[in-house]
């Protein structure tokens, strides 16, 4: 089974990206995947009050409708994140809307939050065993009259089944969504979202961490203001980053497509932004490092730049699921080499170095 799975990335590349993705989800739904061995204790870590057996997850967008969170955990991830889900189902943008950049090991997507809506995802999450960490990434419908109300609905709807929430205000494919990263709008959004969590906690429910996922394209001066709002509102974590609108250094002809760019070409920009956020927040807010992880070395670089957890998506398309095991081996090796106890001891050790690099170097 493992050998078959390692061949999958090449075979899947013969199909259109969305067909390949659907086939992957169906295989996972059928349980046609190898189960990972238990993690060594040195990879265990904690994040905003959650305890994980390892810091690796698959990023949002892979399992938009909560079809396979348990398969993701069995593949060896320390956590899964479903979504982005919006209150009402929506079809997203016209196809084709996902493009591989084979030369650059990247992907451009302009899916536009295609998903089956809250009810369908909630139904699936209610049916699954309450084991493992499964976060819910929430967003707003394209034509919502009050977008912030859609996020509040996300918190209310999934409170009993989510281990944590990610507020996605950084997708470039819903026009105007990234405006919610403007400080005043962000403050309004977070005030309402946290009020909704407080209501749940007043009813005796546990505190669910709330994480905000940012774009890697926020100008430096604005980033300072955004971080001031996130700190003032006491967010439990920050995820950096979503896809980029930058097309710096690409060679593939698909680079002309509109949408968000992910994968290897995003690695540099997202890791530098991660390190800058780590420095600006003094390492006090735990971070999820995302963007262009396609090797053990790249995942370790995110940890050293300041990430407590990492997530990946595009790397899996090019490398297949054996990448997860390879990342763990690299991380375990680094823990031994540096003579520390656990992976968490390496967080941020090279943040200064990363933060000083130019974004488009
Ligand atoms: C096809 C595709 C769909 C995505 N959908 C979402 C989404 O629904 N919500 C979200 O927060 N991020 C979404 N993302 C962004 C990823 O979660 C991640 O932040 C980004 O791809 C960078 O990581 P990577 O380089 O490892 O892919 C999507 C990415 C891709 C490639």
Image (spheres, helix red, strand yellow):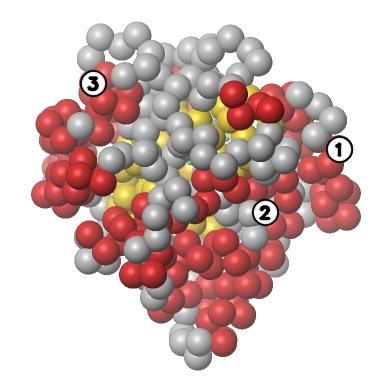
> 280 above or below 240?
below
Where residue 322 appears, as percent x and y from the top left, is: 74, 57
Residue 199 image point, x, y percent: 15, 36
Is 22 located above or below residue 190 in the figure? above
Q: Residue at x 58, y 54 (%)?
A: 293
- Residue 100 visible within the image: yes
Task: Tell me the residue that label 1 is attached to.
Answer: 11
Q: Quadrant of residue 272?
A: bottom left
Task: Return the disc, 3 or 2, that comes first in the chain's sequence.
Answer: 2
Query: Is any atom of residue 123 visible in this view?
Result: no
Q: Which residue is mark 2?
A: 75
Ranked by sequence position, the earlier of labels 3 and 1 is 1
- 63 or 264: nearer the viewer: 264
Q: Is mark 2 within 8 Å of ligand 1?
A: no
Mark pair 2, 1: CA separation: 19 Å
44 left or right, relative to 239? right
- Upstream in the sequence, badge 2 or badge 1? 1
Check the image and name the residue furthest to the bottom.
339
For the residue carrying disc 1, how many other residues have a C-alpha within 10 Å: few (<14), some (14-19), or many (20+)? few
Q: Is residue 326 above or below residue 80?
A: below
Compared across the picture, whether 344 is left or right of 43 comes to left
């Amino acid at each position: 089974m493992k050998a078959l799975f390692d061949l999958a990335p090449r075979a899947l590349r013969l199909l259109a990206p969305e067909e390949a993705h659907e086939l992957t989800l169906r295989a996972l739904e059928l349980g046609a995947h190898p189960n990972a061995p238990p993690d060594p204790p040195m990879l265990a870590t904690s994040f905003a009050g959650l305890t994980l057996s390892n810091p690796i997850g698959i990023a949002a967008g892979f399992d938009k409708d909560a079809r396979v969170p348990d398969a993701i955990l069995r593949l060896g991830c320390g956590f899964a994140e479903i979504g982005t889900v919006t209150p009402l189902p929506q079809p997203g943008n016209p196809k084709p809307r996902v493009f591989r950049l084979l030369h650059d090991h990247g992907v451009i997507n302009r899916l536009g939050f295609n998903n089956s809506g809250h009810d369908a995802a909630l139904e699936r999450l209610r049916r699954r065993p309450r084991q493992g960490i499964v976060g819910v990434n929430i967003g707003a419908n394209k034509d919502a009259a009050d977008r912030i109300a859609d996020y509040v609905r996300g918190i209310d709807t999934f409170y009993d089944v989510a281990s944590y929430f990610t507020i996605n205000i950084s997708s470039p494919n819903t026009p105007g969504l990234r405006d919610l990263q403007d400080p005043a709008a962000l403050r309004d959004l977070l005030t309402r979202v946290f009020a909704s969590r407080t209501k749940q906690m007043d009813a005796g429910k546990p505190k669910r961490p709330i994480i905000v996922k940012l774009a890697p394209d926020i100008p430096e001066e604005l980033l300072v203001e955004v971080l001031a709002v996130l700190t003032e509102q006491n967010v439990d974590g920050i995820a950096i980053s979503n896809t980029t609108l930058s097309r710096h250094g690409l060679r593939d002809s698909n680079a002309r497509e509109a949408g968000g760019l992910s994968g290897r070409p995003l690695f540099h920009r997202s890791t530098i932004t991660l390190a800058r956020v780590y420095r600006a927040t003094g390492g006090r807010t735990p971070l999820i490092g995302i963007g262009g992880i396609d090797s053990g070395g790249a995942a370790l670089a995110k940890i050293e730049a300041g990430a407590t957890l990492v997530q990946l998506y595009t790397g899996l398309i090019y490398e297949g699921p054996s990448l997860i095991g390879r990342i763990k081996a690299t991380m375990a090796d680094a823990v031994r080499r540096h003579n520390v106890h656990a992976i968490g001891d390496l967080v941020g050790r090279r943040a200064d170095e990363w933060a000083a690099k130019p974004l488009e170097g």
